[in-house]
Amino acid sequence: MDRSLYIAMNGAKQTLLAQGANANNLANAQTTGFKADFEQFRAMPAFGPGYPSRVYSMTERPGTNMASGSIHTTGRDLDVAINGQGWIAVRNAEGQEAYTRAGDLRLTPEGLLQNGAGLSVLGEGGEAITVPPAQKLEIGTDGTISIVPQGVNATNSVIVERIKLVNPDPANLEKREDGLMHAKQAGAIPADATVTLIQGSLESSNVNALAAMVEMIELSRNFELQSKVMKNIDDTSGASAKLMQVA
């Protein structure tokens, strides 16, 4: 009887974990460049002395949905979207190089180029990009940043830097707790000249909000079922205890 209780309890716990991953996907359905996480259940025998006598459920996050989101035009000069495969190199809060598809760029008062999450965009040399004061700024399809400096004729443009764009094998990328993609192997991924950008556009999240809502309902029902099983086990245990007292 205790075995069935622990199995039901474990199933409820893993359902909550899966619900958390699904809720995170749903919460980011409108986040620029967000990639949805997969989640799944699998059986996990409890190993110990002798043969495995119990099988528990275990939630896994087998990977990230790398499918591209839809591209929509914004008309804003600092908005860029990856055209096809590829990633934009940024520096995360720990100072590490990471990769994102969020191209909602902006300039700080100090001229530092960041995305909407406040992460510094990196140049091909791996350093944060700083843009001097300019009256006009353009980002080419190859990631080249050109400006017309203040007080200079509009026809005189200057190349400032080139955004680092990479295109590694998706199998060599993993999403970590910061929500960014990281290389599984140590070291920065080299720039790829074949990756191109679309200026004045953004990539939307690839989360299917309707499918995530349906998944949320199914997981809620699974949790309710596990809770009912635990209650039935508790009732049965109480009835058995009373029979023992009568005996």
Image: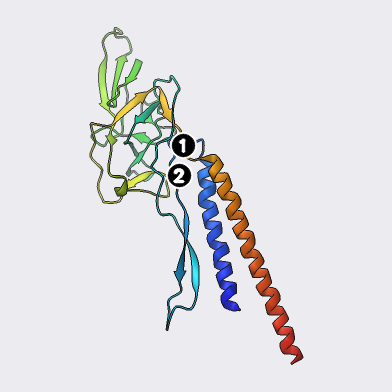
* Total numbered labels placed on residues in the image: 2
Q: Nearer the viewer, residue 148 or 98?
A: 98
- Mark 1 belongs to which amino acid? Ser
In the structure shown, which secondary structural element does the residue marked by tag 1 occupy? loop
In which quarter of the view is residue 107 placed? top left
Q: Residue at x 74, y 92 (%)?
A: 247
Q: Position of residue 153 (x, y in %)?
A: 29, 7
Q: Position of residue 23 (x, y in %)?
A: 54, 47
Q: Is residue 31 left or right of residue 78?
A: right
Mark 1 sits on what residue? 205
Q: Is residue 208 left or right of residue 130?
A: right
Q: Earlier in the sequence, mark 1 or mark 2?
A: 2
In the structure shown, which secondary structural element does the residue marked by tag 2 occupy? loop
- Mark 2 belongs to which amino acid? Ala
Q: Residue at x 30, y 24 (%)?
A: 141
Q: Position of residue 77 (x, y in %)?
A: 39, 20
Mark 2 sits on what residue? 36
Q: Nearer the viewer, residue 89 or 231?
A: 231
In which quarter of the view is residue 163 placed? top left
Q: Residue at x 33, y 46 (%)?
A: 182
Depicted 150 relative to depicted 115: above or below: above
Whether residues under marks 1 and 2 lie with C-beta atoms below 8 angstroms apart, the answer is yes
Q: Residue at x 32, y 24 (%)?
A: 131
Categorize mark 2 by other alpha carbons within 10 Å: few (<14), some (14-19), many (20+): many
Depicted 115 relative to depicted 237: above or below: above
